[in-house]
Image (spheres, rainbow, N blue to C red):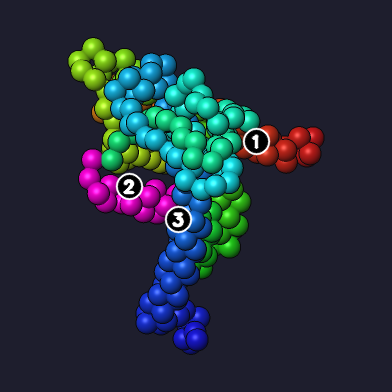
Amino acid sequence: MKSNDGFLPFWDHVEELRKTLIQILFVIAVGFAFSLYFYQPLMLELLKPLKNLSGFQQDWEETLVFHKQLKNTSKQEQILHLPSRFKMIYPLPAGVIQSDPQTFNLAPYASIEIVETSLLVLLNPIEGFASVIKLSLWLSLVATSPIWLFLLLRFITPAVTVSLRQQLFWFLPLFGILFYAGLISAYYVTIPLANQYLFAFGSGIGMNLWNLASYLEYTLLLLLGNGLGFELSGILFLLIHLQIVELEMLYQMRRYAYVVILILSAVLTPPDILSQLLLTIPLCGLYELGILQARWKNTLKKTHAAAPYVKSL
Protein backbone atom coordinates (compact mmCIF):
# COMPACT_ATOMS: atom_id res chain seq x y z
CA MET A 1 0.00 0.00 0.00
CA LYS A 2 1.31 3.45 -0.96
CA SER A 3 0.97 6.70 0.94
CA ASN A 4 -0.61 9.87 -0.48
CA ASP A 5 2.72 11.16 -1.85
CA GLY A 6 3.26 7.95 -3.85
CA PHE A 7 5.99 6.45 -1.65
CA LEU A 8 5.76 3.33 0.48
CA PRO A 9 5.91 3.86 4.26
CA PHE A 10 9.09 2.75 6.04
CA TRP A 11 7.63 -0.45 7.49
CA ASP A 12 6.29 -1.46 4.07
CA HIS A 13 9.87 -1.21 2.77
CA VAL A 14 11.01 -3.39 5.65
CA GLU A 15 8.32 -5.95 4.79
CA GLU A 16 9.39 -5.95 1.12
CA LEU A 17 13.01 -6.45 2.22
CA ARG A 18 11.97 -9.35 4.45
CA LYS A 19 10.12 -11.04 1.57
CA THR A 20 13.08 -10.53 -0.75
CA LEU A 21 15.55 -12.00 1.76
CA ILE A 22 13.28 -15.02 2.31
CA GLN A 23 13.13 -15.59 -1.47
CA ILE A 24 16.93 -15.28 -1.75
CA LEU A 25 17.47 -17.72 1.13
CA PHE A 26 15.02 -20.17 -0.45
CA VAL A 27 16.85 -20.03 -3.80
CA ILE A 28 20.22 -20.57 -2.08
CA ALA A 29 18.77 -23.43 0.00
CA VAL A 30 17.49 -25.19 -3.14
CA GLY A 31 20.89 -24.75 -4.77
CA PHE A 32 22.57 -26.08 -1.61
CA ALA A 33 20.38 -29.19 -1.57
CA PHE A 34 21.08 -29.80 -5.26
CA SER A 35 24.85 -29.36 -4.77
CA LEU A 36 24.79 -31.62 -1.70
CA TYR A 37 23.02 -34.37 -3.66
CA PHE A 38 25.60 -34.23 -6.48
CA TYR A 39 28.64 -33.51 -4.30
CA GLN A 40 30.63 -36.52 -5.54
CA PRO A 41 30.87 -35.55 -9.24
CA LEU A 42 31.36 -31.90 -8.21
CA MET A 43 34.21 -32.90 -5.89
CA LEU A 44 35.81 -35.03 -8.61
CA GLU A 45 35.61 -32.07 -10.98
CA LEU A 46 37.51 -29.87 -8.54
CA LEU A 47 40.14 -32.58 -8.09
CA LYS A 48 40.78 -32.95 -11.84
CA PRO A 49 43.63 -30.38 -11.86
CA LEU A 50 45.46 -32.55 -9.30
CA LYS A 51 45.21 -35.67 -11.47
CA ASN A 52 46.95 -33.82 -14.30
CA LEU A 53 49.65 -32.46 -12.00
CA SER A 54 53.00 -33.92 -13.02
CA GLY A 55 54.59 -35.91 -10.21
CA PHE A 56 51.72 -35.53 -7.75
CA GLN A 57 50.01 -38.86 -8.45
CA GLN A 58 53.31 -40.75 -8.38
CA ASP A 59 54.22 -39.17 -5.06
CA TRP A 60 50.96 -40.31 -3.47
CA GLU A 61 51.19 -43.82 -4.90
CA GLU A 62 54.60 -44.23 -3.33
CA THR A 63 53.69 -42.83 0.08
CA LEU A 64 49.97 -43.45 0.67
CA VAL A 65 49.17 -47.04 -0.26
CA PHE A 66 46.62 -49.13 1.67
CA HIS A 67 46.57 -52.87 0.98
CA LYS A 68 43.25 -54.69 1.05
CA GLN A 69 42.19 -58.27 0.29
CA LEU A 70 38.76 -58.94 -1.17
CA LYS A 71 37.36 -62.49 -1.16
CA ASN A 72 34.29 -64.03 -2.74
CA THR A 73 32.83 -66.04 0.16
CA SER A 74 29.77 -67.20 -1.78
CA LYS A 75 29.34 -70.34 -3.88
CA GLN A 76 28.55 -68.30 -7.00
CA GLU A 77 30.70 -66.19 -9.31
CA GLN A 78 30.73 -62.51 -8.32
CA ILE A 79 31.42 -59.44 -10.44
CA LEU A 80 33.57 -56.82 -8.72
CA HIS A 81 33.83 -53.25 -10.04
CA LEU A 82 36.58 -51.20 -8.42
CA PRO A 83 36.39 -47.40 -8.11
CA SER A 84 39.21 -45.51 -9.83
CA ARG A 85 41.13 -45.03 -6.57
CA PHE A 86 41.62 -48.81 -6.27
CA LYS A 87 44.20 -50.71 -8.30
CA MET A 88 44.75 -54.43 -8.76
CA ILE A 89 48.02 -56.11 -7.74
CA TYR A 90 49.19 -58.28 -10.63
CA PRO A 91 49.54 -61.08 -11.63
CA LEU A 92 45.91 -62.16 -11.29
CA PRO A 93 45.37 -65.12 -8.95
CA ALA A 94 43.55 -68.29 -10.03
CA GLY A 95 39.82 -67.92 -10.41
CA VAL A 96 39.92 -64.20 -11.25
CA ILE A 97 39.17 -62.91 -14.77
CA GLN A 98 39.52 -59.25 -15.74
CA SER A 99 36.83 -57.98 -18.14
CA ASP A 100 37.94 -54.32 -18.20
CA PRO A 101 40.52 -52.20 -16.30
CA GLN A 102 38.31 -51.87 -13.21
CA THR A 103 35.96 -54.88 -13.45
CA PHE A 104 36.82 -58.44 -12.34
CA ASN A 105 34.95 -61.76 -12.23
CA LEU A 106 35.69 -63.72 -9.05
CA ALA A 107 35.09 -67.48 -8.94
CA PRO A 108 33.68 -68.95 -5.68
CA TYR A 109 36.12 -68.45 -2.78
CA ALA A 110 38.64 -66.65 -5.03
CA SER A 111 40.33 -63.56 -3.61
CA ILE A 112 42.26 -60.60 -4.98
CA GLU A 113 44.63 -58.12 -3.44
CA ILE A 114 44.19 -54.45 -4.22
CA VAL A 115 45.76 -51.15 -3.19
CA GLU A 116 43.89 -47.94 -2.45
CA THR A 117 45.45 -44.59 -3.27
CA SER A 118 44.10 -41.13 -2.51
CA LEU A 119 44.92 -37.73 -3.95
CA LEU A 120 44.11 -36.00 -0.66
CA VAL A 121 44.02 -37.04 2.97
CA LEU A 122 41.52 -36.41 5.78
CA LEU A 123 43.19 -35.27 8.99
CA ASN A 124 40.22 -35.52 11.34
CA PRO A 125 36.89 -37.42 11.49
CA ILE A 126 34.63 -34.56 10.36
CA GLU A 127 36.94 -33.01 7.75
CA GLY A 128 35.27 -34.84 4.86
CA PHE A 129 31.75 -33.90 5.99
CA ALA A 130 32.68 -30.27 6.71
CA SER A 131 34.40 -29.98 3.32
CA VAL A 132 31.32 -31.27 1.49
CA ILE A 133 29.06 -28.79 3.35
CA LYS A 134 31.40 -25.89 2.59
CA LEU A 135 31.69 -26.93 -1.07
CA SER A 136 27.91 -27.26 -1.47
CA LEU A 137 27.28 -23.86 0.13
CA TRP A 138 29.76 -21.98 -2.04
CA LEU A 139 28.65 -23.75 -5.22
CA SER A 140 25.06 -22.88 -4.37
CA LEU A 141 25.93 -19.20 -3.91
CA VAL A 142 27.75 -19.19 -7.27
CA ALA A 143 25.25 -21.23 -9.28
CA THR A 144 22.18 -19.33 -8.01
CA SER A 145 23.81 -15.87 -8.16
CA PRO A 146 21.93 -14.77 -11.34
CA ILE A 147 18.60 -15.49 -9.60
CA TRP A 148 19.28 -13.88 -6.22
CA LEU A 149 21.01 -10.90 -7.84
CA PHE A 150 17.89 -10.39 -9.96
CA LEU A 151 15.73 -10.52 -6.81
CA LEU A 152 18.03 -8.04 -5.08
CA LEU A 153 17.99 -5.66 -8.04
CA ARG A 154 14.20 -5.94 -8.24
CA PHE A 155 14.02 -4.68 -4.65
CA ILE A 156 16.52 -1.83 -5.21
CA THR A 157 15.50 -0.54 -8.65
CA PRO A 158 12.15 1.11 -7.64
CA ALA A 159 14.29 3.78 -5.94
CA VAL A 160 15.97 4.78 -9.23
CA THR A 161 14.68 6.24 -12.47
CA VAL A 162 13.04 4.05 -15.13
CA SER A 163 15.92 4.68 -17.57
CA LEU A 164 18.59 3.68 -15.03
CA ARG A 165 16.52 0.65 -14.02
CA GLN A 166 16.40 -0.58 -17.62
CA GLN A 167 20.15 -0.10 -18.03
CA LEU A 168 20.88 -2.02 -14.81
CA PHE A 169 18.82 -4.97 -16.01
CA TRP A 170 20.51 -4.83 -19.42
CA PHE A 171 23.90 -5.05 -17.69
CA LEU A 172 22.88 -7.95 -15.45
CA PRO A 173 23.77 -10.62 -18.09
CA LEU A 174 27.16 -8.95 -18.55
CA PHE A 175 27.90 -9.31 -14.83
CA GLY A 176 27.01 -13.00 -15.07
CA ILE A 177 29.18 -13.52 -18.15
CA LEU A 178 32.16 -11.81 -16.54
CA PHE A 179 31.75 -13.78 -13.31
CA TYR A 180 31.66 -17.14 -15.07
CA ALA A 181 34.53 -16.04 -17.34
CA GLY A 182 36.55 -15.54 -14.16
CA LEU A 183 35.58 -19.02 -12.93
CA ILE A 184 36.59 -20.60 -16.25
CA SER A 185 39.89 -18.69 -16.30
CA ALA A 186 40.68 -19.87 -12.76
CA TYR A 187 39.70 -23.50 -13.41
CA TYR A 188 41.55 -24.00 -16.70
CA VAL A 189 44.52 -21.63 -16.28
CA THR A 190 45.16 -20.33 -12.76
CA ILE A 191 44.56 -23.47 -10.69
CA PRO A 192 46.61 -25.90 -12.87
CA LEU A 193 49.55 -23.46 -13.15
CA ALA A 194 49.40 -22.52 -9.45
CA ASN A 195 49.24 -26.21 -8.46
CA GLN A 196 52.29 -26.99 -10.57
CA TYR A 197 54.23 -24.03 -9.19
CA LEU A 198 53.33 -24.70 -5.54
CA PHE A 199 54.00 -28.43 -5.87
CA ALA A 200 57.44 -27.81 -7.39
CA PHE A 201 58.22 -25.17 -4.76
CA GLY A 202 57.08 -27.45 -1.92
CA SER A 203 59.07 -30.39 -3.25
CA GLY A 204 62.26 -28.44 -2.65
CA ILE A 205 61.33 -28.05 1.02
CA GLY A 206 59.61 -31.29 1.98
CA MET A 207 56.99 -33.87 0.99
CA ASN A 208 53.73 -32.52 -0.44
CA LEU A 209 50.95 -34.00 1.70
CA TRP A 210 47.89 -31.92 0.86
CA ASN A 211 44.69 -32.45 2.82
CA LEU A 212 41.16 -32.15 1.48
CA ALA A 213 39.94 -29.16 3.53
CA SER A 214 42.97 -27.00 2.74
CA TYR A 215 42.92 -27.84 -0.97
CA LEU A 216 39.19 -27.11 -1.31
CA GLU A 217 39.56 -23.82 0.57
CA TYR A 218 42.46 -22.83 -1.67
CA THR A 219 40.62 -23.88 -4.86
CA LEU A 220 37.37 -22.13 -3.92
CA LEU A 221 39.30 -18.97 -3.01
CA LEU A 222 40.89 -18.93 -6.47
CA LEU A 223 37.58 -19.62 -8.22
CA LEU A 224 35.56 -17.03 -6.32
CA GLY A 225 38.40 -14.50 -6.27
CA ASN A 226 38.77 -14.64 -10.04
CA GLY A 227 35.01 -14.55 -10.55
CA LEU A 228 34.59 -11.53 -8.28
CA GLY A 229 37.59 -9.75 -9.82
CA PHE A 230 36.18 -10.14 -13.33
CA GLU A 231 32.72 -9.07 -12.14
CA LEU A 232 34.10 -5.84 -10.63
CA SER A 233 35.21 -4.92 -14.15
CA GLY A 234 31.54 -5.00 -15.09
CA ILE A 235 30.94 -2.15 -12.60
CA LEU A 236 33.58 -0.11 -14.47
CA PHE A 237 31.82 -0.83 -17.79
CA LEU A 238 28.49 0.27 -16.25
CA LEU A 239 29.96 3.52 -14.90
CA ILE A 240 31.46 4.26 -18.33
CA HIS A 241 28.14 3.52 -20.02
CA LEU A 242 26.36 5.90 -17.61
CA GLN A 243 29.10 8.50 -18.33
CA ILE A 244 29.93 8.73 -14.64
CA VAL A 245 33.51 7.80 -15.57
CA GLU A 246 34.91 9.67 -18.60
CA LEU A 247 37.80 8.86 -20.94
CA GLU A 248 40.10 11.53 -19.51
CA MET A 249 39.56 10.20 -16.00
CA LEU A 250 40.49 6.69 -17.15
CA TYR A 251 43.73 7.99 -18.67
CA GLN A 252 44.59 10.00 -15.55
CA MET A 253 43.83 7.11 -13.19
CA ARG A 254 45.51 4.36 -15.24
CA ARG A 255 48.64 4.08 -13.05
CA TYR A 256 46.65 4.15 -9.84
CA ALA A 257 44.16 1.65 -11.29
CA TYR A 258 46.95 -0.83 -11.98
CA VAL A 259 48.17 -0.49 -8.39
CA VAL A 260 44.61 -1.00 -7.10
CA ILE A 261 44.23 -4.07 -9.35
CA LEU A 262 47.48 -5.51 -7.99
CA ILE A 263 46.31 -4.96 -4.39
CA LEU A 264 42.87 -6.37 -5.21
CA SER A 265 44.47 -9.48 -6.77
CA ALA A 266 46.54 -9.98 -3.61
CA VAL A 267 43.38 -9.80 -1.49
CA LEU A 268 41.27 -12.10 -3.69
CA THR A 269 43.89 -14.85 -4.19
CA PRO A 270 46.14 -17.02 -1.99
CA PRO A 271 49.48 -15.46 -0.97
CA ASP A 272 51.53 -16.70 -3.92
CA ILE A 273 52.83 -14.43 -6.67
CA LEU A 274 51.77 -16.60 -9.62
CA SER A 275 48.03 -16.70 -8.83
CA GLN A 276 48.09 -12.95 -8.14
CA LEU A 277 49.71 -12.21 -11.51
CA LEU A 278 47.30 -14.55 -13.30
CA LEU A 279 44.42 -12.42 -11.98
CA THR A 280 46.19 -9.06 -12.38
CA ILE A 281 46.94 -9.50 -16.10
CA PRO A 282 43.33 -10.10 -17.31
CA LEU A 283 41.98 -7.36 -15.00
CA CYS A 284 44.44 -4.89 -16.52
CA GLY A 285 43.26 -6.07 -19.94
CA LEU A 286 39.64 -5.43 -18.92
CA TYR A 287 40.61 -1.93 -17.76
CA GLU A 288 42.09 -1.26 -21.20
CA LEU A 289 38.87 -2.60 -22.70
CA GLY A 290 37.03 -0.02 -20.59
CA ILE A 291 39.19 2.70 -22.16
CA LEU A 292 38.16 1.47 -25.61
CA GLN A 293 34.52 1.57 -24.49
CA ALA A 294 34.96 5.18 -23.29
CA ARG A 295 36.53 6.14 -26.63
CA TRP A 296 33.59 4.62 -28.46
CA LYS A 297 31.15 6.52 -26.20
CA ASN A 298 33.03 9.77 -26.94
CA THR A 299 32.82 9.08 -30.67
CA LEU A 300 29.06 8.51 -30.44
CA LYS A 301 28.63 11.67 -28.38
CA LYS A 302 30.51 13.77 -30.96
CA THR A 303 28.50 12.20 -33.79
CA HIS A 304 25.18 13.01 -32.08
CA ALA A 305 26.37 16.54 -31.25
CA ALA A 306 27.33 17.18 -34.87
CA ALA A 307 24.15 15.64 -36.33
CA PRO A 308 21.84 18.72 -35.92
CA TYR A 309 24.50 20.97 -37.46
CA VAL A 310 24.92 18.68 -40.48
CA LYS A 311 21.15 18.49 -40.90
CA SER A 312 20.82 22.27 -40.89
CA LEU A 313 23.40 22.56 -43.69
Please, what is the three-letter code of the amino acid marked with disc 3? Leu
Return the residue at label 2.
128
For the residue pair 253 and 83, the one nearer the viewer reads as: 83
Q: Position of residue 69 (x, y in %)?
A: 39, 35
CA distance for labels 3 and 2: 13 Å
Specify which label sits upstream in the sequence, 1 or 3.
3
Circle number at residue 21: none
Which residue is the extreme one toward the top? 204
Identify the residue at image location x=49%, y=84%.
2
Quadrant of the rendered structure where residue 47 is? top left
CA distance for labels 1 and 3: 50 Å
Return the residue at label 1.
300
Badges 2 and 1: C-beta atoms under 8 Å apart? no
Q: Is residue 44 placed above or below 75 in the rendered structure? A: above
> Which residues, given as a range, are shown in magenta?
123-142
For the residue pair 51 and 49, the one nearer the viewer reads as: 51
Specify which label sits upstream in the sequence, 3 or 2.
3
For the residue pair 86 and 126, the one nearer the viewer reads as: 86
Question: Is 165 positioned to the left or the right of 221 in the image?
Answer: right
Q: Position of residue 202 (x, y in %)?
A: 25, 18
Foreground disc of the pair 3, 2 = 2
Give the class, few, some or many, for how many residues have Cα within 10 Å of label 1's Cα (few <14, many ≥20).
Answer: few
**Magenta span has 136?**
yes
Which SS does the magenta portion mostly show?
Answer: helix
